[in-house]
């Protein structure tokens, strides 16, 4: 029974015991990998990988791989983790990310530490295409990310790819408004994801929900600066992308380039459907409500195509605030398929400029509106 009881208990693995220094200069990647191996192979129900307080651990690009023996692996980040700034180490990574957790079930990453991507060297025009995400969760089931501060990623701060049953809460993500492609949280090919009670202010989308994702719930997020909360982009290069059952609620967007946005490229295949935006507050937002089915940010070779992503069953309810543009509702739907069942209810958006009239724009958008100002008579039956 003693061995049984031991296997039920938790076991802790401190990175310092595996040779980590934490002076912000020494490469602590080998020590972290050793500690991870021990935690992952532990016979206990719960193993804890401890990153101690008041130290900064410098890490090169590193992947923490499962599957692991324990039911739960808890990475307790009390200290800070910083990226090495040498660009050559990032050149041939299988997953373009500085830190990766791959194929781990029952993972918890939590604490009060800072994950510092030290990304500013990547933000110049010449490096931007080669920049990596800071933290990626790949094929992780039942994971929790809680409490950390994520700063200055080279690219997206947090990426979820092919994950199931994830909760991200009480985190703080920040990068300068001018930093390119520094999305807060990117979600792709993932299901049953909750993102809640967090602050995100970066140079790109606060949250982007991309193809292959469903049952995504975004609640109580404060977003800004940045590009707002986006579905997409979907259908680039003629891809088949699907997104459904997304709820965005009780969020505040402040000074963002767009508010709540659905963006699809011409020529894609698939759909975006059953998406609701509820109880959203806008403060000085550019383009508060936008469906853009002609997304083409490069402005090169932007041709209309015969195929397109089908957008349907989108609801906007209890949404209010101010817009710096007078086109406050923009529903630019596909020229062939249009959007169907777009519902606006209790939507009140005014211009930040006193006495300036706010107005809607629709193209091939079908649906209905009630208790909405400006009224949206351009919505088709």
Image (tube, helix red, strand yellow):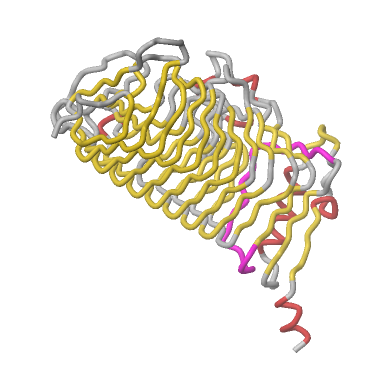
The correct choice, above or below, for 243 with respect to 332 in the image is below
The correct choice, above or below, for 326 with respect to 77 in the image is above
Who's the residue at 50% across and 20% down the image? 284
Instruction: Say which quarter of the image contains residue 302.
Output: top left
Pinpoint residue 101: horizontal percent, then vertical percent: 59, 49
Instruction: Say which quarter of the image contains residue 154.
Output: top right
Q: Nearer the viewer, residue 371 or 333?
A: 371
Pinpoint residue 235: horizontal percent, then vertical percent: 29, 33
Is 61 a magenta residue?
A: yes
Pinpoint residue 6: horizontal percent, then vertical percent: 76, 78
What are the residue bounds of the magenta stretch?
55-72
The correct choice, above or below, for 117 with respect to 8 in the image is above
Q: Nearer the viewer, residue 174 or 290?
A: 290
Q: Nearer the viewer, residue 58 or 153?
A: 153
How many numbered marks have been drawn onto this rendered protein structure? Answer: 0
Pinpoint residue 274: horizontal percent, then vertical percent: 30, 46
Farthest bottom residue in view: 1
Q: Is residue 366 left or right of residue 291?
A: left
Who's the residue at 67% across and 65% down the image? 41
Q: Is residue 55 left or right of residue 270?
A: right
Give the quadrant of the C terminus: top left
Is 367 a magenta residue?
A: no
Q: Is residue 336 left or right of residue 272?
A: left
Give the quadrant of the N terminus: bottom right
């Amino acid at each position: 029974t003693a061995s049984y009881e031991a296997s039920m208990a938790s076991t802790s693995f401190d990175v310092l015991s595996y040779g980590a220094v934490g002076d912000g200069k020494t490469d602590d990647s080998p020590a972290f990998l050793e500690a991870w191996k021990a935690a992952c192979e532990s016979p206990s129900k719960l193993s804890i990988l401890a990153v101690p307080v008041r130290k900064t651990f410098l890490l090169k690009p590193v992947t923490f791989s499962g599957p692991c023996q324990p039911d739960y692996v808890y990475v307790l980040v009390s200290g800070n983790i910083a990226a090495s700034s040498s660009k050559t180490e990032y050149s041939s990574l299988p997953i373009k990310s500085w830190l990766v957790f791959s194929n781990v079930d029952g993972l918890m990453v939590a604490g009060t530490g800072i994950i510092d991507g030290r990304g500013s060297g990547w933000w110049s025009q010449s490096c931007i295409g080669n920049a990596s995400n800071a933290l990626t969760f790949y094929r992780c089931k039942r994971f929790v990310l809680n409490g950390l501060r994520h700063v200055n990623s080279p690219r997206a701060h947090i990426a979820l790819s092919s994950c199931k049953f994830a909760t991200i809460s009480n985190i703080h993500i920040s990068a300068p408004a001018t930093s390119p492609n520094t999305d807060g949280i990117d979600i792709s090919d993932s299901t049953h994801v909750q993102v809640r009670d967090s602050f995100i202010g970066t140079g790109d989308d606060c949250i982007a929900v991309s193809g292959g994702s469903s049952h995504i719930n975004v609640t109580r997020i404060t977003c800004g600066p940045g590009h707002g909360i986006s579905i997409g982009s979907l259908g680039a290069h003629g891809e088949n992308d699907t997104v459904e059952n997304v709820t965005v609620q009780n969020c505040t967007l402040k000074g963002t380039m767009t508010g709540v946005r659905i963006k699809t490229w011409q020529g894609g295949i698939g759909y975006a459907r059953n998406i609701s935006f509820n109880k959203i507050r806008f403060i000085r937002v550019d383009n508060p409500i936008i469906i853009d089915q002609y997304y083409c940010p490069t402005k090169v070779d932007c041709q209309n195509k015969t195929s397109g992503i089908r957008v349907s069953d989108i609801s906007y309810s209890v949404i209010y605030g101010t817009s710096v543009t007078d086109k406050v509702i923009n529903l630019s739907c596909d020229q062939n398929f249009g959007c169907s069942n777009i519902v606006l209810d209790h939507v009140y958006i005014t211009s930040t400029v006193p006495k300036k009239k706010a107005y809607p724009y629709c193209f091939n958008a079908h649906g209905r509106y009630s208790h909405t100002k400006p009224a949206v008579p351009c919505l088709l039956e």
